[in-house]
Image (cartoon, grey):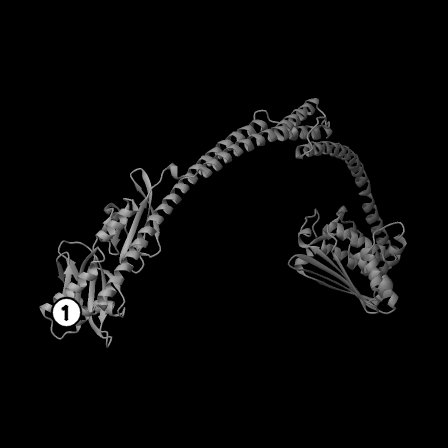
Amino acid sequence: MKGKAKEKLISIAGIDREKESLANGLNRMLRLGLLILTCAFLVSFVVIIQKERRDHELKEAETYRNSVESSILAAMDNYVEISSLILMNDDVQKFLSAEKVDRGLTNDTKYSVLKILAVCNNIDSVHIFRNDLDYMKTSKSEYRVDFDRMKQPEWQKLIMDRKGGPVVRINGYDALFSFDGKTLMTICRVINNFNNQQKDGILLMSIDDSLLNMILHAQKNEHICILTDRGMFLAGDENLMKYYDESFLSEKAKSKSIWQGVRHGTIVGGKVEELPIVILCYSTSSLKAISWESILCLVLMAIAFGIAVFLAGAYLSKNITRPLAQLTAEIDRTKLAGGLEPLSVRLPENEIGELGDNYNDMIAHLQELINSLLEKEKMIQKAEVWALHEQIKPHFLYNSLETISAMAIDAGADDVHSALETLGSFFRNFLSKGDREIPLEREVHIIQDYLKLLKLRYGDIISDEYEISEEAKSCVIPKLILQPLVENGIYHGIRMKGEPGSVTIKAYLSEHNLHITVRDSGVGMPQEEIDKILKQKRTAKNEDDLNQFGFGLWGTIERVKYFCDKEDVVRIESVIGDHTEIEFIIPRDKTIRKTEETI
């Protein structure tokens, strides 16, 4: 037995030399971890650089776009002011309110308009339409007027809804076209009469595309494109038009990453506020756009990373791999020695040191277990001899009872014969071939035989009732746990009451437990006595108290606690002068043990 325990311990503690050592494994994992972290650092470096470049591209493109938008809005404000001067001109008012237009009135109006236009450039044409659609114009180019379009309610409503305010549309809201094919922005306004504020006509003032080219030239950026909200080119880099889509129609600028060959760039675009034009701005950057502060931070991170890896490797070597190698060598030494010896190597005061201490504690505990097993083996051998000896006693007892019973029959003592027969049945069930646990049904048979013997002595003053469910009968319980309860109820309960009484035994299964209840109609127990039985431990000082209050009851409760491996197994409820009820609550999984004996 001792040799087998040593062999098992050595097999657990031994190291398989065909497997890789932990030190080599840790070194390999460190190298792998270093490689992974290096790759992660390089990827992070590239990602950060790319983010810096794209942020720079986005910021630069937004700056150019905002600058172009501001310049266009400022210029359009100036042209709106000029259109206001034209609306308030007396000759224009006369031209619109005259019942009949002649050449002289037309020339005077044209001359007055040209004087106003002389203060600014980039106005390609001015068309002033009367209500009858007769009109006057000043233009650098030839235009075609679509009168059918101007008569449409949609066209009229757009301009009328502004109540004299300006609205900017392309090519006069599709009513004014230049013969040279240029796409121009047109300021459209209603002209009201000074006296009655009724509509006298409409002003269409077209802005030359040279304005947009001039604004773009001032930006010194070749990658800016201005187009209409319908995608028609106005000015700038026409190559950017292929990247235009409806997402850029939002007045809040949108960005899009693009590749032109192997070169990455960012396009920022958006619709100009209250104008039918969209500005696209393309920007690309190089490493020069990355700040030195960012590069310096990345370099410092790389240095710190290298130092951290070096320190981690040194720490692991000092506190893990080297102590583990020492521990392994010491265990090999004890294995080769062929005995259970404690470790003598000095280990660091960390988890590995605790492992060595625990190993030494395990060796000491194994030595104790081996000695204990040897002692138990000797006791088992003695117990086997004692069991063989004790098996002789029941047979002698049974044979003696049968002989006395036969003599009682010959003598005509039928009551003695019945008592002896009952006592024999009681002992057969009581002994139960040495089993410690028996089925509940056999335990009930013991109680029935016991009460039958008592009735022979006391007569009918004791009655018994049984309510045992069928499924509970086969449950296995500790042997002789009900008899002490019945005996205690009769001698300390019913007899003390001085009148006939009853004992009721119930048993049933709930979802998780077996419930066994013994109830007597005796004098009852005070709560102090119940508490003492349930809470006291057996000692030399309180043994007399336990005998007084029912040592058999207390001992039975202790046996059930041991059987169930828990404390909360009993409930005692009593009413003074009426009854006492004791209930055992046994887990179902404890009641399914198989015995060698069947009912």
Q: Which residue is mark 1?
A: 133
Q: Residue at x 20, y 66 (%)?
A: 203
Say whether residue 191 is visible.
Answer: yes
The residue depicted at 28 percent of the width and 56 percent of the height is 75
Q: Considering depth in this image, is 584 or 164 the residue closer to the camera? A: 164
Residue count near mark 1 (Cα–Cα under 10 Å), binned few <14, some 14–19, many ≥20: few
Say which of 480 and 529 sits in front: 529
The x and y percentages for residue 505 are 75, 62
Q: Toward which corner of the image does residue 115 lie, by quadrant?
A: bottom left
Name above or below for residue 461 compared with residue 420.
below
Query: Which one is in front, 444 or 96?
Result: 96
Residue 261 locus on image (x, y percent): 29, 38
| Residue 198 placement (x, y as % from top left) | 23, 75
Of all residues shown, which one is farthest toward the left?
103
Q: On the rendered structure, is 126 left or right of 427?
A: left
- Counting labels gives 1
For residue 146, say whether it is visible.
no
Is 589 left, or right, of 199 in this rendering?
right
Secondary element type, mark 1:
loop
Q: Quadrant of the N terminus?
A: top right
In-image side of 40 versus 498 (left or right): left
Q: Position of residue 429 (x, y in %)?
A: 77, 52
Dot 1 amino acid type: Leu
Q: Which residue occupies the foreground of this view, 408 or 73?
A: 73
In screen coordinates, is 451 left or right of 354?
right
